[in-house]
Image (cartoon, helix red, strand yellow):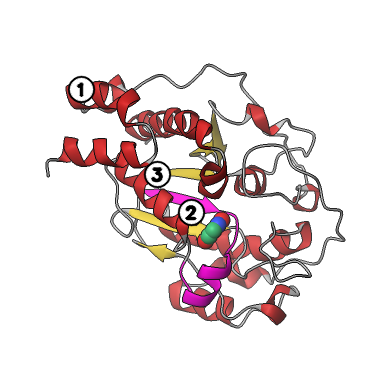
């Protein structure tokens, strides 16, 4: 199968084949992909404390806010750890109550020198069992999204989550991480980002977007798409969470526009 045919297949898997294939086959270049919809620019709110982040669901769409009491963050020594030290710290972490119910921590996976970093919300049931992020149905869609971009899991890509342990509700169902859980876990992701030093970050869903960008909770998240945000000097593109897309097929087209914006941003990033 040629690269173009493979990309068309991925787009079809995302439910986009008939819409996007012609443009893709003809050009094959990032600059000629469909423009993302022009949306209002959203400015990060400076010096919003991490504790002000919203606990979020698995999509960019608006969802209910869970009130929680912020906890103290993990030790600053995390910021000096190498990969092995960091992995060890994560696997033994007891910074929040998620450690009590996890099967295992889910550290992240991929190329430690990747130029593309994809950040999700937190492990679900499958990930908790297998110890790898995005291995369930949402993971298959994420693989297809990456494939449509000419990327592949583990090759120049790294996949991580905001929290490393599976959040569950009282019925052992997956739920979004609470504020204190996301806050407690954030230093691990921050260290992963520092070690990887990716060119670009793709935030998958609301939890990832607001946690990474430290945005005012009052920010309407519907406006986060379509703009290039910053984590330090790194471009951050916000798109829908794959699990959300599985339930809302009509938004796959918007996601493709986001991924095209990411590809264009990648091309022009330092
Ligand atoms: N959803 C996420 O956000 N991360 C995973 O690893 C799996 C599902």
Q: What element carries label 2?
A: helix
Q: Name the residue under label 2.
A: 138
Separation of marks 2 and 1 at Cα, in angstroms: 29 Å
Q: Could you tell me residue 72's position as x and y percent?
A: 79, 67
Q: What element carries label 1?
A: helix
Q: Are the residues flagged by discs 2 and 1 in contact, CB closer than 8 Å?
A: no
- Determine whether, in the image, residue 148 is placed left or right of residue 222: left
State which tag comes first along the sequence, 3 or 2: 2
State which tag comes first along the sequence, 2 or 1: 1
152 is within the stretch colored magenta: no
Question: Residue sitting at 23 percent across and 22 percent down?
Answer: 22
Q: What stretch is highlighted in magenta?
A: 116-132
Q: In what quadrant of the picture does the C terminus appear?
A: top left
Is residue 178 visible in the rendered image? The answer is yes
Any atom of ligand 1 within 8 Å of the CB at mark 2?
Answer: yes
Q: In what quadrant of the picture does the N terminus appear?
A: top left
Is residue 194 visible in the rendered image? The answer is no
Question: Residue sitting at 75 percent across and 52 percent down?
Answer: 55
Q: Name the residue under label 1.
A: 27
- Determine whether, in the image, residue 265 is placed left or right of residue 105: left
Residue 62 figure quarter = top right
């Amino acid at each position: 199968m040629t690269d173009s045919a493979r990309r068309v297949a991925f787009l079809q898997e995302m439910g986009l084949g008939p819409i996007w294939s012609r443009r893709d086959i003809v050009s094959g270049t990032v600059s000629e992909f469909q423009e993302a919809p022009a949306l209002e620019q959203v400015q990060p709110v400076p010096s919003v404390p991490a504790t002000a982040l919203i606990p979020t669901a698995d999509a960019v769409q608006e969802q209910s806010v869970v009130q929680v009491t912020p906890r103290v963050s993990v030790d600053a020594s995390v910021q000096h750890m190498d990969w092995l030290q960091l992995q060890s710290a994560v696997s033994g972490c007891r910074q929040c109550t998620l450690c009590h119910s996890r099967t295992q921590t889910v550290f992240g996976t991929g190329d430690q020198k990747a130029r593309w970093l994809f950040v999700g919300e937190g492990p679900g049931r499958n990930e908790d069992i297998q110890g790898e992020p995005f291995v369930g149905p949402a993971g298959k869609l994420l693989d297809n999204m990456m494939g449509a971009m000419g990327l592949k899991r583990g090759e120049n890509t790294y996949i991580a989550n905001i929290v490393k342990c599976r959040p569950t509700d009282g019925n052992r169902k997956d739920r979004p991480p609470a504020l204190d859980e996301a806050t407690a876990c954030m230093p691990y992701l921050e260290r992963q980002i520092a070690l990887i030093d990716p060119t670009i970050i793709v935030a998958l869903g609301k939890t990832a977007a607001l946690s990474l960008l430290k945005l005012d909770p009052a920010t309407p998240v519907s406006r986060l798409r379509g703009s290039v945000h910053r984590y330090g000097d790194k471009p951050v593109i916000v798109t829908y969470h794959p699990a959300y897309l599985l339930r809302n097929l009509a938004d796959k087209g918007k996601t493709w526009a986001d991924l095209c914006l990411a590809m264009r941003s990648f091309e022009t990033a330092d």
